[in-house]
Amino acid sequence: MSGKLQASVTVVINSIAQAKKAAGIRVYNLSAGEPKMMTPQVVRDAANEFIQQGDIPYPSPAGLNELRKTAADRMNKLYGSSFTQDECIITTGGKMAIYLLLQYLCGLNSPLKANPNDKIGVMIQAPFWVSYPSITKIMDGKPVIINTSEAGGWKLTPEMLKAAYTPDCKVLMLNNGVNPTGIIYTRSEMQALLAMAVELDLLVISDEVYSTLVYTDDEYVSCGSFPEYKKHVVVIQSASKAFAMTGWRVGFLFAAPEIIDVMSALSTQSTTGVCLIAQHGALAAFKHADEINQWVNETMKRRRDIFVDAFRKYFGIQLESPKATLYVFTSLASLGVTGMSDDEFCIRALEEANVASVPGSGFGQPGYVRFSYGADEDDLDGGLENLAKFVKSLTK
Ligand code: GLU
């Protein structure tokens, strides 16, 4: 693909792994970040019931009011925010929420542009989720990447933010827990980042889709939980990870009503709104949210532990257990691999060992690899066993 348009590397690798599997090949798919679990029965039942009553019209562009209210109430209950129904829109997954928002903020009619030719700077910490800079570029914005380091715990600090700032920067993209590094920010760290963002007059987009996948007693801190910064913050949420509903494509964006109105208008010109069958499924999920969140969290925690143990068994190293998300992000050097790029490593691991993983370059961190332990349980130990054999064959 040419120019600015770049396919998502996570989605591309996952598709290759799925195609191999469909062709009957035993693939260990540690690529896409999804909790590989059955969607809860209550969700499927509610969707079936809605289908059976037969009246399935166009959705309303902002989503079912009941779902908007329920999603806002859940955010407020879990994270101490104060969102109302009018401050929530339902989107086709969290990705579409970011896509529409960046279209508004960086696109032709951006309220942030003094001149039509201005490029809006979007500040993004690296390693980043693959789609943040790509969507920014698709929308004619300018990604401003701020590198963090493993030695610094992969954390972005206010000082780093200030140092990277240029006057064209208008937006800060935050992600907590962070894909791909698995870290979370403390309340005081988040408070300091938000204070600096406001000082620099940045609108903060906070991607919080992993908020229910935290495996320690650490508090999960939502950017929506600071009343003093509410008007500077947009929060992205999703049913995908919280409720094991990746394929249903239901996401949520929380922001001031003026932003919701624009998102809604963009929705009328793009998707028209989210499939009503999926919205009814999500509504049912919220009715059983505590139980489902707990079930997904416990299952993912168990898989994380299996994966970390298998890592020690096959590679002889004790990984630090990630506190959150679905990912282990580690250097090629830690695997004992030298003289090879991460792209080449991941391609060859998929071709020669049938293990799918994602190269760090896609996340802005060459020399690293991301593994998802959200994978089927059978793929975790077996995948690392195969990978270790593959790595051994490289050094022969
Ligand atoms: N967000 C997940 C990941 O990072 C799902 C795939 C995608 O949309 O990027 O793997």
Image: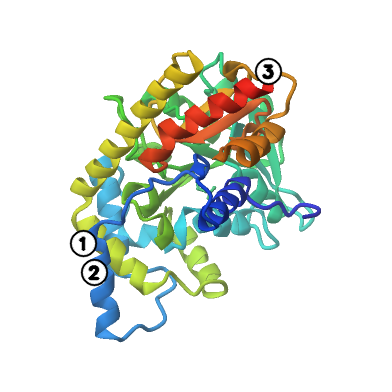
Mark 3, Cα crowd under 10 Å, few <14 / some 14-19 / many 20+, is: few
- Residue 359 point in image, percent of width and height: 63, 35
- Label whose residue precedes the other's in the sequence (3 or 1): 1
Q: Is residue 25 left or right of residue 118?
A: left
Q: Residue at x 60, y 51 (%)?
A: 16
Mark 1, Cα crowd under 10 Å, few <14 / some 14-19 / many 20+, is: some
Circles 1 and 2, Cβ within 8 Å, touching? The answer is yes
Circles 3 and 1, Cβ within 8 Å, touching? The answer is no
- Residue 64 point in image, percent of width and height: 33, 70
Which residue is label 1 attached to?
42
Q: Is residue 102 left or right of residue 242?
A: right
Q: Nearer the viewer, residue 68 or 226?
A: 68
Q: Would you say residue 118 is visible in this rendering?
A: yes
Tell me the tag on residue 46.
Answer: 2
Circles 3 and 2, Cβ within 8 Å, touching? The answer is no
Q: Is residue 219 left or right of residue 126?
A: left
Which residue is label 3 attached to?
395
Looking at the rendered structure, the kind of residue marked 2 is Ala
Quarter of the view holding residue 55: bottom left
- Residue 32 point in image, percent of width and height: 51, 45
Identify the colour scheme used: rainbow
- Label whose residue precedes the other's in the sequence (3 or 2): 2
Looking at the rendered structure, the kind of residue marked 1 is Val
Is 48 rendered above or below residue 107? below
Quarter of the C terminus within the rendering: top right
